[in-house]
Amino acid sequence: MLTKRIIPCLDIKDGRVVKGVNFVALRDAGDPADNALIYDREGADEIVFLDITASSEQRPTLIDAVERTANVVFMPLTVGGGIKKLDDIKTLLRAGADKVSINTQAVLEPDFVGEAAYRFGTQCIVVAIDAKRTAAKKGWEVYIYGGRKSTGIDAVEWAVKMEKAGAGEILLTSIDRDGTKSGYDIELTSEISRRTGIPVIASGGAGSMEHFYQGFTKGGADACLAASLFHFRELSIKELKKYLSNKGVMVRMV
Amino acid sequence: MIVIVDYGMGNLRSVEKAIASIGASSEISNDPGTILKADKLVIPGVGAFGDCMKNIRAYGIEDAVKQFVAKGRPVIGICVGMQMLFDDGDENPGVKGLELMKGRVKGFDYEQLAGEGLKIPHMGWNTVKQAKKSFLFEGIEDKSYFYFVHSYYPAPLEDVTIGTTDYGIDFTSVVQKNNVVATQFHPEKSQANGLRLLSNFINYRG
């Protein structure tokens, strides 16, 4: 049986891991490769790097971090943030990333995901969707530029469209829940999981082990992602997996 | 020398690094002469079956790989590198594989899997049931986890299956025919179990 995946996400800035709440009061939390190795030993199933480096001149620091991580960690690594061109994808894959996550560019350039999937294979193209409930509470809207700009696009329709374009996986973040620790947006997750035939990663809102359980069972997620919860050691991946396994969720015990 | 066959597809560096981490060295090459002189070959593969076969022919290394196998030297195929060992596949009908093992590469049945709530691609960690004893499984427990990413799987027409995996159906995930072995999963992405499997291949004295 295929197991459900637990994915820690590391925010990377200028080639270093940063921790902070809502990108405020960021503090240096060490080297990405060192952090990835800790998660590797704890039993993470994959790792996501999200680059929040502001200036493109600092891009080489990310590439270097990916290279050094891929030298020591032998598990799938997804890298997202700031991908604008096919060449950006090539550089990251060459550096050792297994998948790349595309967000804003997928919206700005309608053919980008299709071209990327055609050139590099659907298996390495993750489309990240930042979704927020609409004011009318009818459905969710896609936001870009790190959740700062609304697009008017319906998130569920967008997920279906991205699957057709060649996305191999969807990284679905609820903006409403992100940083709240009140649990994943189960309704959003289950709606997109039901409407698409590709794996869905739930993200945004995890605050307890119960939330992961709900993400997998009620939300139908194939993987659950969390950042600060793991960063700040509020939850260990080992404990989480033991809990899920006891509740009947198939997870890989290490 | 272990040679990683380069035909312009796939993440060769991750395989190279995994081999380096277990203390062996390897060379990435697309030169038929280098391939023929190797002690062992690794055939990785990412992307579509047809593209991979097209490239391996365009690089002029199909014959070198076949000669290498004919000499009885050890080869490991990974993912599409496994699929290419077979006759042909659903993904690109009409494109011939390396025809080193009899069988066809089939696609997961979308309808059947959807009915069971399973997605395509088959992506993530799944177990391998060891159907036969092999040097490849030395020191690896039965039903250990490995990392998979694929939408197609080989359906052998000869007795080469040494490991199977359950994803809606029980499919062949590891094969061995004499000194040619292959895995549908990515050992280079499967942490300790994967590195052990690669090390078994590297230390194999076929």
Image (cartoon, coloured by chain):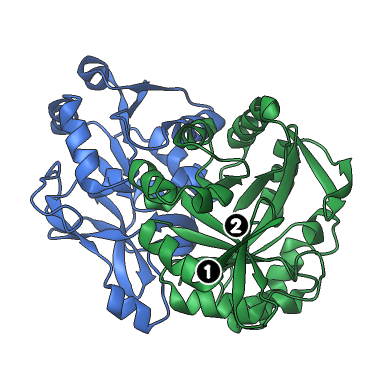
Residue A114 image point, x, y percent: 37, 50
Residue at the right extreme, as displayed: A25
> Going by the image, does A145 lie left or right of B32?
right
Classify mark 1: helix, strand or loop. Answer: loop
Residue occupied by mark 1: A3
**Relative height, residue B33 to residue A53 (above, below):** above
Give A36 or A41, whichever is nearer the viewer. Answer: A36
Q: Are marks 1 and 2 in contact (CB under 8 Å)?
A: yes
Disc nearer the start of the sequence (1/2): 1
Q: Amino acid at mark 1?
A: Thr
- Residue B157 occupies which quadrant of the picture? bottom left
- Residue A225 occupies which quadrant of the picture? bottom right
**Relative height, residue A19 to residue B28 (above, below):** below
Residue A102 image point, x, y percent: 54, 49
- Residue A245 occupies which quadrant of the picture? bottom right
Give B124 or A147, whichever is nearer the viewer. Answer: A147
Question: What's the CA distance linking mark 1 and mark 2?
Answer: 10 Å
**Relative height, residue A193 to residue B97 (above, below):** below
Give the chain of mark 2.
A
| Image disc number at residue A45 | 2
Q: Residue at x 20, y 32 (%)?
A: B56
Q: Residue at x 72, y 42 (%)?
A: A52
Q: Residue at x 86, y 51 (%)?
A: A20
Q: Colour of chain B?
A: blue
The chain assigned the colour green in the figure is: A
Residue B123 seen from this side: yes
Classify mark 2: helix, strand or loop. Answer: loop
